[in-house]
Amino acid sequence: MECTVRWGGLDGGMTFVAETGSGHAFVMDGAPAGGGRNLGPRPMETVLAGTGACTAYDVVLILKKSRQDVRGCHVKLSADRAEDHPKVFTRIHMHFVVRGRNLKPAAVERAVHLSHEKYCSASAMLNKAAEMTISHEIVEDA
């Protein structure tokens, strides 16, 4: 896996463009208080968002393989960071909302736990530095 991150230069404030090995690009920026212009998410926000996408991907895939009629899935992440540098995440809570028809509660719980405990590599890395908790709810689709 590869990624190149380029600073926008002197006129770019604290804007960085990431180009991934799979051919995609996205912008990250700092807060105005730190010299940024708020043109994109903060780098640590992208770490949190990537973790959410990684684990939600697993949950959807596991539910589909379990032949569950999953119609939607989102995960809300909330995190605390250390006060001092390096300001690592110290606590992360992930709340999954899984939407579908006739979803088996045990299957949803299993999918969430399997992602958290076995499959999500981003969660596994962050779990080494932060206390991680998970919760979930099921929404019946009409």
Image (cartoon, rainbow, N blue to C red):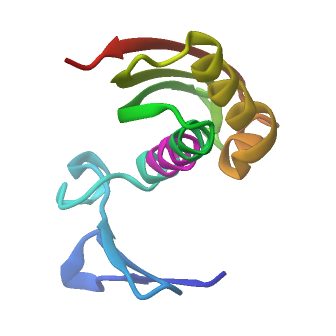
122 relative to 27, above or below: above
Where residue 117 sits: x, y (%)?
79, 32
12 relative to 104, above or below: below
When asked about the image quadrant of residue 92, the answer is top right
Where residue 16 sits: x, y (%)?
35, 74
Where residue 90 sits: x, y (%)?
66, 26
When asked about the image quadrant of residue 28, the answer is bottom left
Which of 105/129 is in front? 105
- Residue at 42% over, 88% down: 23
96 relative to 22, above or below: above
Quadrant including the N terminus: bottom right
Which of 138/9 is in front? 138
- Residue at 29% over, 83% down: 8
Where residue 64 sits: x, y (%)?
53, 43
User: Residue 50 in magenta?
Assistant: yes
User: Residue 75 in magenta?
Assistant: no
- Residue at 26% over, 46% down: 33
Q: How many marks?
A: 0
When asked about the image quadrant of residue 126, the answer is top right
134 relative to 61, above or below: above
Q: Is residue 2 left or right of residue 4?
A: right
Majority secondary structure of the magenta segment? helix
Q: Is residue 42 left or right of residue 66?
A: left
- Residue at 75% over, 46% down: 119
Q: Is residue 46 left or right of residue 40?
A: right
What range of the chain is rendered magenta? 48-57
Quadrant including the C terminus: top left
